[in-house]
Amino acid sequence: VPELPEVETVVRGLVPRLSGHRIASVVVHRPDIVDIPVRQFRSRLKDRTVNGVHRRAKYIVIDLDDDSILTVHLGMTGKLLFFEAGQAPQTTHPAVRFRLTAGPMLVYDDVRRFGRIWWGRRSAWAERSARIGPEPLARTFTWHTLFAGLQASRAPTRSWLLDQRRIAGVGNIYANEALFLAGVHPSRPACAVDEPEARALHAGLKRTLSNAIRGGGTTLNDYRDATGAPGRYASRLRVYGRDGDACAVCATAIERTVFAGRSAFFCPACQT
Ligand SMILES: [Zn+2]
């Protein structure tokens, strides 16, 4: 499932390729992906120029020249792929195609179709964005911010990290990785994380997220960047998906448990 580093990688691939292009036409193959009526969606987007692309939480945010916004959430298996003019689009489950003037094509492809494409006014997007928590890689996200948030909650720390209203863009992979780096057990109540641990968790989040961006994200199955390339970070995961492997720090076997419907991976010796 694409998280902050994967979405950031897609965005970094789109910025130089998509910005400045005008949308010539839109074909919607899967209307359930788009959250306004297809006819309206097509007419809103036709002839719009892309002013810029950025990321907010797990959303790809595309700024259009009429003060409207297109956001793409990749769901479980979504891919937003850019094909140069003359390049044959390699897609398996195309849901929406955006043909750009001068020939390139942007295709949203999604096997399981949990993804979503939203169109709206800038002001409506600003309201949605305001309900999402702070960006963990922003300089303004300090360990104090994290510690204060954790103190106010009795939820398991892993659940706290996955809650998009508390912190943006963190999913199960990087929550587990950051908790390992901080020595905090995933099911420990958030309010029982002490000050030194909150500092370590803050550092662990920044470290694992920025290293994963540098590695182009984690590909377990479906994730691809905007050019169709897989991420290179999976081999560097320390606990996620590694149950039975030796902990890199103490050699104890990594364990897996399930709570709140999701697998949690941890070292029983390093994480208390
Ligand atoms: Zn260990």
Image: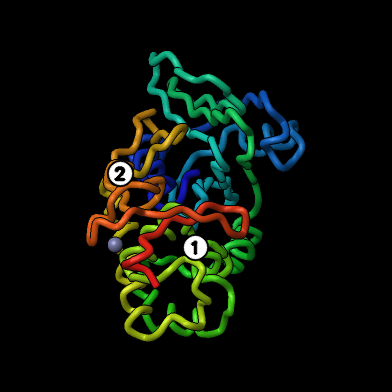
Residue 123 picture quarter: bottom right
In front of the other: 40 or 87: 87
Q: Is residue 176 left or right of residue 28?
A: left
Q: Is residue 187 shown above or below 101?
A: below
Q: Position of residue 15 (x, y in %)?
A: 37, 43
Residue drawn at (32%, 83%) of the image = 196
Residue drawn at (63%, 34%) of the image = 113
**Residue 149 visible somewhere in the drawing:** no
Q: Position of residue 237 (x, y in %)?
A: 32, 49
- Residue picked out by circle 1: 168
Residue drawn at (36%, 35%) of the image = 17
Q: Quadrant of the C terminus?
A: bottom left
- The alpha-carbon separation of the residues under discs 2 and 1 comes to 20 Å
Badge 2 marks a residue whose secondary structure is loop
Badge 1 marks a residue whose secondary structure is loop
Q: Position of residue 63 (x, y in %)?
A: 51, 49
Residue drawn at (58%, 79%) of the image = 154
- Residue picked out by circle 2: 233
